[in-house]
Every structure is written in C-alpha cells, then in structure tokens.
C-alpha cells in the first residue's frame, strides 16, 4: 500500500510539474506574441511617419505641362531629283512648296527643237507624291 501511495504522489507531482511547464510555456508564448505585435506596431508607426511626414506628398492635378528648348536642326525628306527628258526652258505650272500627287503635271519644257524635230513642249510629270522644289539644296539622296 505504501508503494501505491508513493506512486500516486509521484504521479500527482508529475502532473503538477507538467501543468507548470505547460502554463509556463503558454505564458512565454503570450509574452512573445505581445512583444512581436508591439514590434510590428512600432515598425508600422515608423514607416507611416517616414512616408506621410518626412516625404512631402501632394494630390495630382489636371493640367498641361509644356517644355520648350531651342535647337538647330535639319529636316530631311526623302527627296527625289527628277531629270528633264530634254534640255530647254522650264515653264512651271505648280508653285514651289505645293503638294502634288503622283503623275501630276509639274510644268512644260520648251526645247530648242522637239524630239521629232518639232518645236512643241514636253510635259514634266511627278514620278511620286511629294512637295515641289525647283532648287537644289545639297541634301538630295541623303
């Protein structure tokens, strides 16, 4: 019987120590959770301070932004030199700077003598659409 009493006391003692260990573990977990939440909360407060106080923010507004700059440059078109079929005097029909479509008559060339020996004029047509320019600027074929 004495063994049974000692055994029962020993079992009760084990239960008490395991309960103490369990309650100590629960207390530690609660304390750790509280500390973790406090650190997270403080971190969020520091982040919010940095974002909303240290950095100046303003609401976006609708409007127009313009920026101008002076620069020198050359505007190049895809220029095409049209050679006259005969030599002679050019009588322009289209003014310089006029936009023309393909196969539009640009002017008449009055040759000294016609291709067949007559003194008639030869039509000069635009080979492609573009802007008429009667002078060379040196940028042709660039």
Image (cartoon, rainbow, N blue to C red):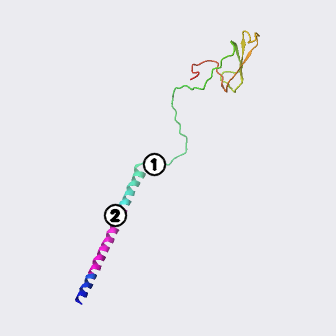
Asked where in the image residue 7 lies, by quadrant, the reply is: bottom left
- The structure residue drawn at horizontal position 58% and vertical position 22%, both measured from the top left corner, is 141
Of residues 32 and 88, the one nearer the viewer is: 88
Residue drawn at x 36%, y 66% is 33
Task: Determine the secondary structure under disc 2.
Answer: helix
Local packing at callout 1 (Cα closer than 10 Å; few below 14, some 14-19, many 20+) is few
**Of callouts 2 and 1, which one flags the residue occurring earlier in the amino acid sequence?**
2
Instruction: Indicate which disc residue 35 carries.
Output: 2
Residue lying at 55% horizontally and 45% vertically, measured from the top left: 62
Location of mark 1 (residue):
57
Q: Residue 72: x and y, percent?
A: 52, 26
Q: Locate the C terminus by quadrant.
A: top right
Q: Is mark 1 on a helix, strand or loop?
A: loop
| Viewer-side label of 2, 1 | 2
Left or right position of 44 against 129: left
**Residue 98 versus residue 13 in the image, above or below:** above
Marks 2/1: CA distance? 33 Å
Vertical order, 97 against 41 (above or below): above
**Residue 14 or 77: which is nearer the viewer?**
14
Question: x%, y% of residue 99?
Answer: 67, 26
* Above or below for 100 versus 2: above
State which quarter of the image contains the N terminus: bottom left
The percent position of residue 21, horizontal first and vertical second, equals 29, 74
Residue in the picture at 28% in, 82% down? 11
Query: How many residues crowd around disc 2 within 10 Å: few (fewer than 14), some, or many (20 or more)?
Result: few
Please provide the residue range marked out in magenta. 12-38
User: Left or right: where does residue 5 sit relative to residue 26?
Assistant: left
């Amino acid at each position: 019987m004495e063994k049974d009493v000692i055994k029962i006391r020993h079992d009760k003692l084990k239960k008490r120590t395991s309960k103490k260990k369990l309650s100590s573990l629960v207390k530690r977990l609660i304390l750790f959770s509280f500390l973790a939440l406090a650190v997270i909360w403080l971190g969020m407060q520091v982040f919010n301070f940095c974002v909303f106080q240290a950095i100046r923010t303003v609401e976006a507004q609708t409007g127009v932004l313009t920026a101008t700059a002076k620069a020198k440059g050359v505007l190049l078109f895809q220029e095409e030199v049209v050679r006259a079929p005969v030599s002679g005097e050019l009588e322009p029909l289209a003014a310089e700077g006029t936009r023309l479509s393909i196969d539009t008559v640009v002017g008449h060339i009055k040759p000294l003598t016609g291709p067949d020996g007559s003194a008639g004029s030869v039509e000069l047509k635009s080979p492609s659409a573009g802007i008429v320019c009667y002078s060379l600027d040196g940028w042709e074929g660039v």
